[in-house]
Amino acid sequence: MTVTDAAAAAGARPAGTAGGPRRHEHWINGRSHAPGAGSYFATRNPATREAGDEIAAGTAADVELAVAAAEAAWPSWAARPARERSDALHAVADAMAAATDELAALEWASTGKTAGQLDVEIRLSIDYFRFYAGVVRAHGGRTIDLGAGAHTYTRLEPYGVIGAITPWNLPLNQASRALAPALAVGNAIVAKPSEFTSPSTVLLARLATQAGLPDGLLNVVTGTGPAVGTPLAAHPLVRKLAFTGSVATGRHLAKVAGDRLIPVTLELGGKSPVVVFADADLERAAAAAALAIQTNSGQVCSATTRLVVEDAAHDEVVARVVARLEKLQPGADFGPIITEAQFHKVLAAFADAERDGLTPLTGGSGYADGPGAAGQYVRPTVYADVPVTHPLAREEVFGPVLVTRRFSGEAEAVAVANDTEYGLVATVWSGDVARGLRVAERIQAGQVAVNGGPLTNDTPFGGYKDSGHGREKGLEALHDYAQTKTISLSLGQGTP
């Protein structure tokens, strides 16, 4: 059975749920662990609004057990040669690949994503473990030439226990993105997935243990941010945090980490621009702009939700985008808004826009009938020429909503692209490649694609400004999850 088949079958009832909702416990020290307080909370499938599985409601006591297990496990893991850690990560990837159907069913049950989206995310999740399994064998410290009288070199050493707090929009993918490099350099992990989409992360930990990852290296404690996330960040044995989520929660965790003087990788929100010059391939640019809000229904922090187009081409590009979006069907081409609170937040943004006199060219509502009405689906939406001061133009909606703005000339294009508190990604489309690169270098964002340039697991990812700091993906993630130590040996020759 393929991922597509598994997701389709799960549309009726996810695999393994014939007897009713399952309970997903914590995963601590290599085994399933019931919550100390004995509490669980229910989930539901946003594609159908049907009741889903029950998730363990963790507390600080559960965090304590998980951190203790991680603290006991990491020294022997860090002492292993890179080759052995590499082999272990490859084994985890193999186990994930063999369990693709089960992972897809769990992801669908909590997110309602389309089969195509599930397929992409699971393949990328597996690839993180493959990538860092390979990289860690080829990448280490360096030697520094201080002359014939010394041998000086650097080492990448782990922090020890890492706290990883991951969001609901890309649960397995975001967990894998943090866990793979952190484990590769010798750390142990306590992961806190979103309480809305925890099951696939718990299964990942189980698969990793079954694949031979030592007990205690990968622990998962499920629950809410206040009950689990904050105690995890504040725990004295946690030496680094990695967080993906909202700016507000990022600020809170940064304060907790700052008080403890520990580093934190923050991957936060975005209001990313797609800049289109009139001489660009307008069909490709329009297709990319439409895909940005179709993918995961715009619930991606790196989605390019501001369409910034040169005056002469604005109306044509917008018309092409609208035509593409109006062909899309809920459940087949795009998934639902994953949480109920976010669903109502997107609908409230539409209501506020209507109140302020803004009319969408397409979309701007949920579904009153048809397949979309069964779940938390929102119509892909475009608002043209939105005033720069309006919240739609400045705030992250985190839904399938695109706003447009015009520009005239290269300087204005850069100014408009940078007119945001965020700086996560951007894309530039231009028939003049030199201009495309000039603009890309002047945009204040961590990743910029020119004319559809690929951004993959190999390329470092992270933000400027309110989009956070630190880098995930690529070689840079190894450095973010490791400490650099310098060792210098005098060889007894010359002056030290």
Image (spheres, rainbow, N blue to C red):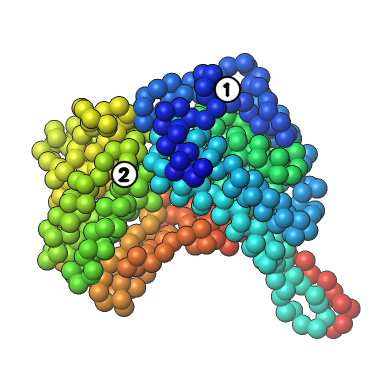
Viewer-nearest residue: 374 or 480: 374
Q: Look at the image and tell me whether residue 57 can be seen.
A: no
Q: Dot 1 corresponds to which residue? A: 23
As drawn, the residue found furthest toward the top would be 38
Viewer-nearest residue: 16 or 231: 16
Q: Taking 174 as reference, is 8 left or right?
A: left
Q: Give me the residue at 44% from left, 54% from top.
A: 463
Q: Where is the C terminus found, in terms of image quarters?
A: bottom right
Q: Secondary structure at mark 1?
A: strand
Q: Position of residue 180 (x, y in %)?
A: 61, 50
Name the amino acid type tagged 2.
Asp
Q: Secondary structure at mark 2?
A: loop
Q: Look at the image and tell me whether residue 360 can be seen.
A: yes
Q: Position of residue 236 (x, y in %)?
A: 68, 36
Q: Is residue 156 above or below residue 34?
A: below
Looking at marks 1 and 2 on the same chain, the residue that comes earlier in the sequence is marked by 1
Q: Give me the residue at 74% from left, 79% from top.
A: 146
| Residue 333: mark in rendering | 2
